[in-house]
Amino acid sequence: MAHAENGKPLRVTDDEAESWHWADADGVVSIVDEWELVSSLSTGSLPHYTLVWREGWKVWLPACQVAELATSLPKEKVEAAVDPGSDPLLTDAPPPPVDRYQAYHTREAAAKLVGKSIKPTARVPIAPPTGRPPPGASPTPPPPPPAIRPAQPTLVEGTPMQSTATLRPPGAVPPPPRGVPSPTPIAAPVAPVIQIKPSDDEAAPASTEAPTNPAASAGPIASAPLPSWSEDLDAEMRANARPTARQMQQSGYAPPPSPPLAIVSPAKKGSGLLVGLIAVVGVGLIGAVAIGVVLLRWSKGPAPAVSATGAAGARDKSPLRACKLEKSAARLSPAILPSVTPVVASIQNGAKFAIGFAAGEREAEGVIVDGSSLAVERPFREKAERDITSVVPITAEGELRFTVDQADPAFRSSRTVDAKGRWTLGWTDQGLARRTGTGAPSTLWPGPSDKVTEPRVAPVAGGGFAVTARRGGQGGSVLVGLLDGSGEKKGETAEVRAKPQVGSPAIAVSDRGLLVAFAGRPTDESYWVLQVGAAPPGGTPSAAQSFATPPGGLGADAISPAVEGLSNGRWLLQWTEGPAGQRQVRIQTLGFDLVPVGDPLNLSPEGLNAGQGVVMVRGDRALSLFLVKKGKAHELWGATLSCP
């Protein structure tokens, strides 16, 4: 987004001819593309009376008086359209008439007192600026120029991993005490080795570690003294120790040949018999102990197998796998309304996907997309009586049908949930509510309901749903709550701590927990960055951390995230990246610890201005949807991924 002071832009995009300018009460001008402005107006992030201007206009107008923006505002906020006048030579925005905000602020305050909206009885002509300070500000010198925007953060704000607390390898033999010399090794008589063959149902585990010296593995090696971790004792032991097999091999040293066997004289026969007797007794004891161990194991039954998550499983090095592009992005529909988020449902276990969206402000459409070819069927189209808030494919009752939610001042931003029993979530003046059928809404979570977004819903394994929404506009808060299968709340909502400004949230559930994602930034002059907050199964996140977008993208803002759960606790995170008018859609596989797995994928074709999407995963296949802007229209595009 480009910002400016006193109506003069600091930065101009290549797509300026299709861009809009809007000004705040302090006279700061921002340049945005059309769908970003429409989205901000439709969600309440910008008030309906926001001053807007585009190239060729003679004057600034409140958004509620612009015919092209009327569909993004509530009906009660729309005023009669005003012609701004046209002059093709006007390429620079005139100074915005910020004094007009005073009238709207006064009108809003009066509306709250009387409990209804007050529209102007006469339109005030647009007057040139008088140079006086913005409303509510004291006469002060001109503000300093805005600070240079800081570079995009590259570090993830999270708790660092703890390293292991021991230096000794697991299972290592401790060294002898300091100051105690190691005893001189005593040569023992060589005894035959007794091998105990395991039973057929007890397969001996194969070693996963290669020998350190393959040449020496063919025979026994004389053991060197254990290190004492003391320099003086180590030097003494090294001087008295025999060279190891590796040292002998490297230095060319060969042990002296064994002397020929000598005939024992009668005088020495007694001592030789004694040594032989000791060896035989020792061998017999070793054999008896070994046989006893085998019999004891047989009496207790076969040894249990080690699970993949046990001691052996802890060393399992099988890597997590990243999603791969299956079918490149293609256009699915030539028209889609950007202010209504498309909703996706899986049919035939991911072989096909049903998508509901608004092709126009009162034109609902439902399509079926083949997951392998992206071929499109168009089984549903319906004209609505009022403005559309969502088009939802319903599959929970066994048959595919599409439900169209329409604007209702008493039940705003409504969205039907794909669940058994027809119920819908939406906002009333009392808070977030649920409505069953055509009955009256019942409040689930009371609280303020100004500048809210539509509820986003994710099904929970075993029944129930996770819900997220934002209230209070960009300076408000992100809420997360849990519902059972019938739509009854399972506790109070959690407010996710994040940066001062937040975008619209998305939510997903996997076998390892819950994840909520949204964009955030600390100030108006900062880039938007992705925020993610995780919680274990059955919980809700209390805070979010920044996710540093991987290299290879356009940089600048990272907005409009979408997220879905994968197997093995993985996540699939999609977002829109880049400056206004030059955005792209990217996607990344994450581990359960939110660490990237594999490389990110750029889904939108190069050179197209794309963004604002959703993701659906079923089985090993994922469907990614996003919008592409062509002129003044928006198209629906999609791509599929393989996520084994």
Image (cartoon, rainbow, N blue to C red):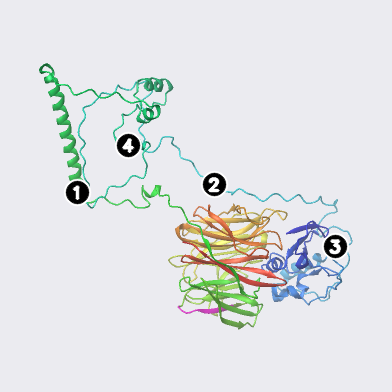
Residue mark closest to the camera, 4 vs 3: 4
Q: Is residue 637 above or below residue 139?
A: below
Cα gap from disc 2 to disc 4, whole angstroms: 45 Å
Residue at point 77% right, 61% down? 24
Within 10 Å of the Cα at label 2, are there few (<14), some (14-19), or many (20+) other Cα atoms?
few
Marks 4 and 3 close (CB-CB < 8 Å): no
User: In the rendered image, which residue does mark 3 sit on?
Assistant: 95
Tell me the kind of residue under disc 1.
Answer: Trp
Residue lying farthest left?
Answer: 266
Q: Earlier in the sequence, mark 1 or mark 4?
A: 4
Q: Position of residue 550 (x, y in %)?
A: 60, 53
Q: Marks 1 and 2: CB-CB under 8 Å?
A: no
Q: Earlier in the sequence, mark 2 or mark 3?
A: 3
Task: Give me the disc on residue 159.
Answer: 2
Whole-number angstrom distance, CA of label 1 to CA of label 2: 49 Å
In three-dimensional space, the C-alpha distance between marks 2 and 3, rounded to whole angstroms, equals 47 Å
